[in-house]
Structure formats: C-alpha cells, structure tokens
Amino acid sequence: MDKKSVLKAIKELRELPKRNFKQSFDLTLNLKDLDIKKPEHQINFFAQLHYPSKKRRVCALIGPELEPEARGVCDKVIMQEEFVNYSKDKRGAKRLASEFDFFIAQANLMAQIAASFGRFLGPKGKMPNPKAGCVVPLKAALKPLYDKLQLMRPLVIKNSLVLHCQVACEDMKDEEVAENVMAVCNQLVKHLPREQANIRRVLLKLTMSKPVIIT
C-alpha cells in the first residue's frame, strides 16, 4: 500500500456531501490466512498514530500518593476509598466504562481495582493495561503517559479477521490523515506472520459514509 492510494481514497471521501457534525475517518483491515486460535496468529497490541485526532478520555484509579499529579492531568480521578462505591453501583460502573477510553491504575492497587472494576472494564477491554503503560508506580509522571495515550489505538482480533480503527477526524489535513492510516497499517504488518500477505483488503470511510477501498 502506498500513500498515493490513501490520499486518493481521502479525496474521494472529501467529495461526499457534508454532514452537520465532525465525522471520523475509520480504517477497516480485512485479514486472511490466519488461525486466530493459534497464539502466534492473534492480534492484540496498541498502534501509535502520528497525529492526534479524537480526544481520548483518561480516568485515574489511584491512592493518595498520585492524587496531586492525577488531578492536574487526567479527565477524572477515582480515589482508593471510592472503589467500593463502584463495586456496588453497577449502573455507575457501566457508565464509567463507556465514558472513558483508558484507565490508569496505581500498581499497588491492582488487586482492589480488579475486584471493584474488573467485571465492568474487562468485557470492554479497558482494564488498566501494562502494554499501554497504564499500570504505574507510586511516583509516576502522568502527563507524558496522558499525551501518549492520545495517540494510541487498540488493534485486537476477537471473533473475526476484521480490525477496525478510528484514525483521524474530518478537520485534519489530508497528509495527517494519510500518515495515520499508513502508521496503523505499517505497525499491523509487523505483527502478522506473513506480513503484507495476510492483509486481504484495506478500506477507509467517514462515520456516515460507505467505505472506499484503498487496496
């Protein structure tokens, strides 16, 4: 896949009738010749975009050691003594899981976090993830992590050989959109056993549009 093909697809989508809200550019990757029951064929990693698009909302699950740092950085802070409230309030916990994209956890509290939030965050794939750097020590600097999370997109195969990823927003420059598309594809290729040969088709769409084939 080359950048010219990506830019051509972006141009085609730009020519569609405008909507009265800011749409996202959504990437779909159809894979082939993978047996997802085999560990070596499973895809589960965080791709890193080159340019930020839609804001990622981050919630911190912490103790007093990280409170000053977290309150100055994160979109929401839940203190250790509040954990039990969410284990009792199923509706509140489900709403929390839907409202936030990433959860940062203080490492020494992970057992309590799993007990209070695991059944709500786990099914959505939002438990604090060490792969994303979201399990942090007592004196962590959270601002660099927060900024890094704004560029992260999870790529996970579950029940089918199709990956979806929101890569950009409509108000971004074509070059930035293309760079993000290429970044995700290039990182995915490195996680596939046969690299490019495992990609059947790459498509790009806007939120309310039909997909356009890139390759």
Image: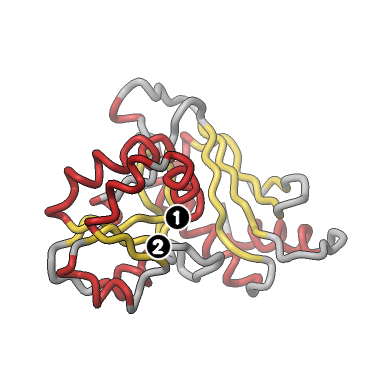
Q: Name the residue under label 1.
A: 101
Q: Quadrant of residue 13?
A: bottom right
Q: Around disc 2, counting alpha carbons within 10 Å, would you say few (fewer than 14), some (14 to 19), or many (20 or more)? A: many
Which residue is drawn at the image coordinates 55% and 58% (left, top)?
A: 167
Q: In which quarter of the image is residue 145?
A: bottom left
Q: Name the residue under label 2.
A: 58
Which label belongs to residue 6?
Answer: none
Is 115 on the left or on the right of 72, as rendered? left
**Residue type marked 2:** Val
Q: Nearer the viewer, residue 132 or 127?
A: 127
Question: Residue furthest toward the right?
Answer: 17
- Tell me how far mark 2 sits from mark 1, CA to CA: 6 Å
Examine the rendered structure and indicate whether residue 68 appears above or below residue 6: below
Q: In which quarter of the image is residue 146?
A: bottom left
Q: Which of 140 and 194 is in front in this view?
A: 140
**Residue type marked 1:** Asp
How far across and down, in percent of the image, does residue 174 sit?
A: 65, 70
Which residue is drawn at the image coordinates 69% and 51% (left, top)?
A: 205
Examine the rendered structure and indicate whether residue 147 appears above or below residue 92: below
Say which label, 2 or 1, has the lower sequence index: 2
